[in-house]
């Protein structure tokens, strides 16, 4: 919390003059891609200013945590759909689409799932996917079916699913998700796969193999959690294009750009450039269909708690004022 406060103070000092909203209108109006943000149900109900900006600027929402296994079924057989239902209701009321996140992920996973033997685990995963995707059948535009399945070197991450179910668990997950909600677009999603590297190569080879097998996979999600501490990834446009050439959609699913604190005007300009390069790469490829950020305001960003010394990663500051990055996307 101390880190987040420091980030907010730094941004307030730097942004002594508010970046004006674009005369072109809200962000969702300047592109034919879906423009989305991760959202939290508690902020939708408790913060009118948060809800107002979200509703104005975006036409797609992703539940930040409310659809993850550890939230919906922390105790086996006991379901809590309250947060997910709230976001789906909000989306319907405001005419927004929903990106479901996520059905199979090794993190934020209840302990009881880790303890299962292989045969039971397979049945439980199948039931979980059928239950959750089935509950929202026809209400979800796209699902992140499998999340973060690879290591940085391109090898399979040794999750409970990989270790006990083997390579086939990914194909099975997509088939079960498709059976539960045949109209939803189904994605594999990962981080550090923005550019051309060993990890994105592995995702490319996997989805090519899944396509050959007739597995119902429709897209690749590129998270795009970036940091000014590192150079901009090489070959982003080329990477998006090669996935599209397989007949797949591509989505930027979790974009943000961390700034090493303190924030300065120069760092905000650099942040705007990083956001802009991802935005431009997506718009250069017809089948890049979505640009979603992982939250839109520094008020609720996950970054300070996970990356000490970094922050101010979103398009809007803690007071919901647009930053230079917003102006770069919506000149």
Image (cartoon, helix red, strand yellow):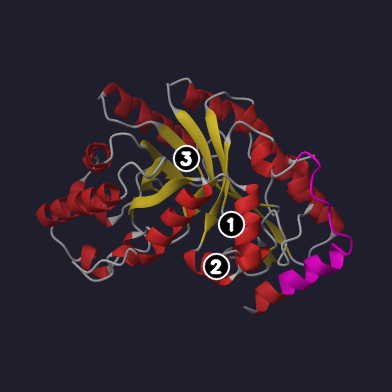
Distance between the alpha carbons at the discs numbered 1 and 2: 11 Å
Mark 1 or 2: in front is: 2
Q: Are marks 1 and 2 in contact (CB under 8 Å)?
A: no
Distance between the alpha carbons at the discs numbered 1 and 3: 16 Å
Residue hosting label 1: 295
In the image: residue 229, left or right of residue 204: right
Can you give x and y, in whole percent of width and height, for residue 25 in the image?
74, 42
Can you give x and y, in whole percent of width and height, for residue 18 in the image?
85, 59
In magenta stretch: residue 8: yes
Mark 3 or 2: in front is: 2
Can you give x and y, in whole percent of width and height, for residue 123 in the image?
13, 52
Local secondary structure at mark 2: helix
- Give the magenta part as a residue range: 6-24
Identify the image quadrant of residue 29: top right
Local secondary structure at mark 3: strand
Distance between the alpha carbons at the discs numbered 3 and 2: 25 Å
Q: Quadrant of the C terminus?
A: top right
In the image: residue 56, left or right of residue 40: right
In the image: residue 4, left or right of residue 81: right
Question: Which disc, if any, is residue 43?
Answer: 2
């Amino acid at each position: 919390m101390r880190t987040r406060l420091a980030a907010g103070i730094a941004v307030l000092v730097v942004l002594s003059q508010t970046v004006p909203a674009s005369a072109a209108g809200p962000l969702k109006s300047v592109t034919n891609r879906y423009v989305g943000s991760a959202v939290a149900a508690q902020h939708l109900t408790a913060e009118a200013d948060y809800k107002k900006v979200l509703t104005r600027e975006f036409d797609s929402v992703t539940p930040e945590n409310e659809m993850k296994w550890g939230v919906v079924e922390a105790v086996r057989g006991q379901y809590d759909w309250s947060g997910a239902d709230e976001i789906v209701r909000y989306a319907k009321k405001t005419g927004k689409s929903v990106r479901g996140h996520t059905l199979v992920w090794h993190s934020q996973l209840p302990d009881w799932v880790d303890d299962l033997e292989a045969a039971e685990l397979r049945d439980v995963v199948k039931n979980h996917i059928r239950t959750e995707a089935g509950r929202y059948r026809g209400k979800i535009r796209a699902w992140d079916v499998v999340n973060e399945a690879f290591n940085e070197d391109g090898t399979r991450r040794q999750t409970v699913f990989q270790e006990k179910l083997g390579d086939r668990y990914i194909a099975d997950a997509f088939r079960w998700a498709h059976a539960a909600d045949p109209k939803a677009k189904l994605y594999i999603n990962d981080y550090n796969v923005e550019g051309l590297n060993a990890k994105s190569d592995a995702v490319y080879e996997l989805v090519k193999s899944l396509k050959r097998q007739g597995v119902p996979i429709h897209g690749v999600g590129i998270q795009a959690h970036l940091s000014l501490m590192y150079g901009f990834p090489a070959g982003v446009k080329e990477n998006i294009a090669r996935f599209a050439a397989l007949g797949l959609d591509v989505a930027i699913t979790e974009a943000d750009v961390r700034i090493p604190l303190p924030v300065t005007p120069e760092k905000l300009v650099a942040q705007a450039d990083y956001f802009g390069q991802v935005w431009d790469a997506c718009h250069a490829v017809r089948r890049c269909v979505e640009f979603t950020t992982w939250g839109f305001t520094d008020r609720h960003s996950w970054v300070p708690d996970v990356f000490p010394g970094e922050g101010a990663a979103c398009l809007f500051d803690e007071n919901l004022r647009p930053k230079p990055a917003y102006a770069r996307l919506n000149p």
